[in-house]
Amino acid sequence: MLEKTRPATRDPLHISPDDPQRSRLFPRGALLGLGLLCAATLALVYPGQNLMRLLSTSADDGLAIDYLRHLVDLRGGNIDLRLMLAQRYMHIGKSQQALDTLRSVHTPQADALRLQIWKARWFDARALGHATEEAQARQALSALLQRTQPANFNEWRDTLVLLQGLDEPQAVQRLTGMVTRFLPLPPAAALQAARLLVGVHAEPLAAQVLFATAKTRVTEAEREQLIEQAARALLASGDPTQAYRQTAAALGSGAVAPQMAWFMVKLALGANQPAEAGDWLRKAVDLDLPAAALGKALTPAQRELAWQVLLAGGDLRGAVHIADAALAQQPGSRTWAERRAQVLEWSGQPDAAMQQWIALLRAEFTRHALDELRRLALALHSSSGLDAYWEQRAAHTTLTTDEWLQYAQALEVRGHPEQAVSILRQAAVKQPEVLTSLAWLLGNMGEVDASLATYAEALKRGALSLRGSIDYAIALLQNGQFEQARQTLEQTQHLSDDTPCHNAPAAAVITDGSAAAQTPPCNDVDLLAAHQGLLGDIAWDMGEQRSAQSAYGSIWNNPQLRDRIKPYQLQRFIILTQKSQGDAAALRLLPQAWAKAPSEALALLWLQSLVRQPSAQGIAEWERVVLGSAAGAPLRQQPQMYAARAQVWRALGRTDRALADLHEALRLAPGNTDNQIALLWMLIDANQPDALRQDVALYSRSLQGLPDGLDVLSAAAQTLGDNAAAVRYGQQLYPRKKTDALWLLNYGDLLAQAGDSRRAQAAYNQSWALLQKAAASGKKSEGKTTDQDLNALLARLRLSHARLDDAGQQALLGQLRDKLRSGDLTVPQTLQANAAIADWLLRLDTNSAARWWLARRVLTPAARQSIELQMALRAGDREAVNRLLQQGAARPLLPQDRAEAERVAGRPLQALATAEKVLETAAERGQDNPALQALARQTAEQQLALAQRATVTLEHRQIDNVIRQGPVLRLSLQFGGQWRLQAQASRQSMHSNNTAALVGVPSTWSDAELGLQWQGERSQLGAALTHNTAVGRLSGWRIEGGTQLPGQVRAQLEAEHNAVADESGPLQIAGARDRLALRLSRDFGRMWANVSTAVMSYDTRRGNPLGHGASTQFELGFWFRRSEPDLSVKLLGYSNRFSANAGPPLPDYAPLVPGGAAPNAAFFIPAGDDVYGLGFGFNMAHNDTYTRRWMPYAEVDVLQSRRLGLTNNLNLGLHGPVFGPDQLSLSYQRQQNTSGLNRQWSLQYRLWFGR
């Protein structure tokens, strides 16, 4: 290892002054030389300083320049010498030499001199127009100013002004911010700086300078001046809101001078601060001064500003006070008066505002004031305001017709009808259109003659409008001048109308400002309908049927007017049409008329037309259109409807339907003698003696006091063979009937049957005399032969025996034959004529039996009964078919048709026996046709429906948490066609599929049921005993029944006790249910509907009460297709409500609860729910019936549940025959409800036997 070299030992440092060995920086000789040099320098410099002082104070520029040049040459780096030399050059105007001298000097002082030089040169060049020198100077100045740093405000100000002149925006922008170095400035300097800054668009900076100075110790006047100027600077920046905010902050909350407060009012208003502007306004002036004093305290400009501020702030009372102050100083100011009116209205004083406008109008008329007055008067419904308005309008403008009417209306409303009449008479000179209103007003005033004269003048001058013509006609009617009213309406049919609906002033209603809306004009269509309707009414009352029909027809035949025809007018039009064009034309009108204006009278009028022109299609259409509508539903409770329809059925030959209707009419109104008479006449015509005898006994007392009652009682007695009663009634009728030839003929027959031949002959003679007299008069009905004419001819033919010779009798017979050959007779008339001829022929023979047989052959009812039966079969009318079968009408039918008739009549076993006999006969004879084949298929299905049935089902069923599976056996045995015995038994395994919710479920489920059912034609009854074993035993019963109600409504009622409750899993195995249910259903062709309701009570199988429930269900469906395969859609819904008892826990059922806790009633009772949805079905009409082929079926319900949300039900299956009279089916059902998931798989085999 190398050793480090140690430094040599140094001598110690001696520093003491008297130490001869102390260290020295310089030798003594060097120090002496240095001292001599300093002394020489001082000797030279001192005279130089005196020279510099001399040069700076010398007035001789030439001498100073020479010295300074030599000194510069001698001392080239001396900056001060160069600066002094440059200043001397500048003083004598040699700027270029000054610039050359300063070329090497770069100090602020040198730059300041250069700046002066170039400024001077730039100004001179601009003044002399030397562009080159000006550009050179500008360039030099720009370069200098870029590096200028002002030392004080004055330099900053000068530099800024210079830069503005040089148009150097970037340099100006840089320099403006430097002003903050000098803040705060004196007030005058601050104002000067602010003006400069605003000039270069630095308004916020200007405001900053002013606000900074305002915070210093300045006088109040200076402070407010600085703040105001700062605000103006900020306003110049385009931000009035910021200007107001900063200015208000600078002023603070203390008192300010009024002038400053006025300034702040304007500033706040410009910043959209009306509330704060109001506060400043109150600092500027005392607004609570009286109006006169306030007006004197404010200048016009201040009043204007105060008005604007108070309006902007919503101080309407203050604005009114300002307007009052202004009007106190300027009483004639229209501007302030209008403003006052406007603000009075805005402040909720419209009446005062209206008076202000009225005063303005009276002082000077202007259109604006007039419009404002009208608007307020209409809004206030002020008659005095409208009066003033129309007074001004009439005085200063030309009024239209509508406006004259409105003026008159205003006067009439105020109780001055005389003035209104005067106004309208004045207007009528040039505007005759007001005559109608004038006439109406005169009529209201009781001046009838003047009113009619005015209407006549309007008609003469061609000014009577359509509406006016209606009013004129009404006035004429009220005066008893019917013909003149009709003529007036006929003359004015062609008019249109544009006058008000209520052209009389008193009836006009003004709603808003527009003229059309003040008095809304009537629709031409409405007026024309009213006009023609009134014309028709007058013509109807006057018996002018042609004119009435034309008037009513003009309404009905016009599509625009049809909706406006009144119901009674429409009925009259149909009556008139029937009279002029016949029943066919009336029947074509009636469906349209019913659609337009359904009424009881119209329905009866329709039936009356059907009586005169009967048709099955017509009565079917009437029932569909009238009774099938909502408007016609009340007719079902009107006896007159049934009475009228009975006449139609009678005309159609449907005596059974006619009698049924008459009986219904009498049920609704038992005391109606007209219907009693009609019923008896119909029974007489129908030859139903038993019913006639019963009803005669029932109604004879009420009919004996009536002439028409005696008529029918006499005919009834005659029909019943009670000649004595018939003669007795005839004697009472004779005084009234002694001029009736046909009645006398019948009376003679009665007397002859009673053995009073003398009086009988007298009656015949009297009848013959009357008939001959009528024939001698030559009066004949035009057109077809009437019943009256024919009956008279038949009566003459009958009485002609022994009263006319053979030639006379042959002449009568020839007339009758001519009528038969002409074809003019109706079918009943032809039958009657044939019977009369047969009767006349047989009168030549003494064999009365032969006469009876021939008459019966001509008028046999057998064919009619057969036809009635066939029509009833086609219509499916069970009651009619059953009645006709009882009367023996089936004899003419074919055998297969007879079987169908018995089936329709509700005789299934008899129909089946008849069909089997027909098929056996056909088989023996080898007959075969499609009708027999259809009968064979139908017979086979009926045999199966009546046969015994045995069913075996293997099912897997889940209800809530309980699953059971196993076989179910069912047996159904038929007895006597109407009784059926039914039995059911099952034993299934059972378990819980959710032990977290339910445990202790028995392993076996046993169920048995035995019931008996009776099936009648319209009703059914059933009863069953039930037994079930699960968690305890349960024995109960069930009773059910159903019947057909009126209106084709099917009602079913069911009551059960101790039944298995499947609403939840615990209820199913441990509960019992009592239930009462009602179900109503009806088919409407392709539609069906049913609704059901039920109430339930739940107990445990040990008898502990659990709770109650109620359920309501509905279903509305439509069949798209009824035959196989059927398709349907339905709307369905149900509402279930359950309530559990609040009783103590049930320890007996603790084993069912996981954990062994005793459950309460809520453990068993499910939650209620409301469900609605849409269902679709395929082959659901045949899902449980025998079919000859395999058939699938399906039903899907999409449901919306209140508790479960969107859910669905599903029912799928397939079934069909295996060996013949049997059926194998596979089905799956699924349902989700509040009790949980319910589903079922089943495989079922059913066998029919015993047929």
Image: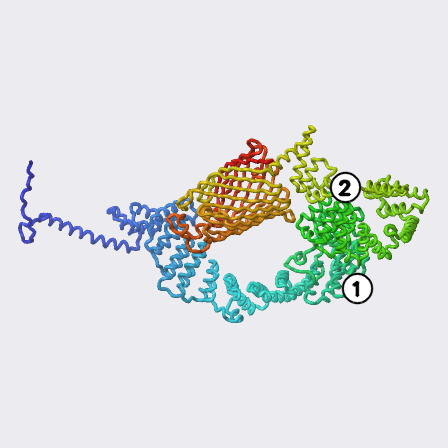
| Amino acid, disc 2 | Arg
Task: Find residue 309 and report its horizontal and vertical position in percent.
Answer: 50, 62
Q: Nearer the viewer, residue 673 or 637?
A: 673
> Would you say residue 286 is visible in this rendering?
yes
Q: Nearer the viewer, residue 487 or 164?
A: 487
Give neighbour class at mark 1: few <14, some 14-19, many 20+ (Cα, 10 Å).
few
Task: Give the secondary structure at mark 2.
Answer: helix
Task: Find residue 184 and report its horizontal and vertical position in percent.
Answer: 35, 59
Task: Give the secondary structure at mark 1.
Answer: helix
> Would you say residue 123 is visible in this rendering?
no
First-in-chain label (1 vs 2): 1
Q: At 37% across and 64% down in the image, what residue appears?
A: 218
Quadrant where the N terminus is found in the figure: top left
> On the rendered structure, is 1023 left or right of 699?
left
> On the rendered structure, is 1002 left or right of 934?
left
Q: Quadrant of residue 1015?
A: top right
Q: At 59% across and 33% down in the image, what residue appears?
A: 1188
Q: Nearer the viewer, residue 938 or 777?
A: 938
Residue 72, compared with residue 507, is above or below; it is above
Give neighbour class at mark 2: few <14, some 14-19, many 20+ (Cα, 10 Å).
few
Task: Find residue 421 and report its horizontal and vertical position in percent.
Answer: 74, 64
Quadrant where the C terminus is found in the figure: top right
Tell me the residue that label 1 is attached to.
449
Task: Find residue 179 and report its horizontal and vertical position in percent.
Answer: 36, 55
- The mark found on residue 864 in the picture is 2
Callout 1–callout 2 Cβ contact below 8 Å: no
Marks 1 and 2: which is nearer the front? 2
Q: Nearer the viewer, residue 678 or 1017?
A: 1017
Distance Cα–Cα, label 1 vs label 2: 70 Å
- How many numbered tags mark residues here? 2
| Amino acid, disc 1 | Asp
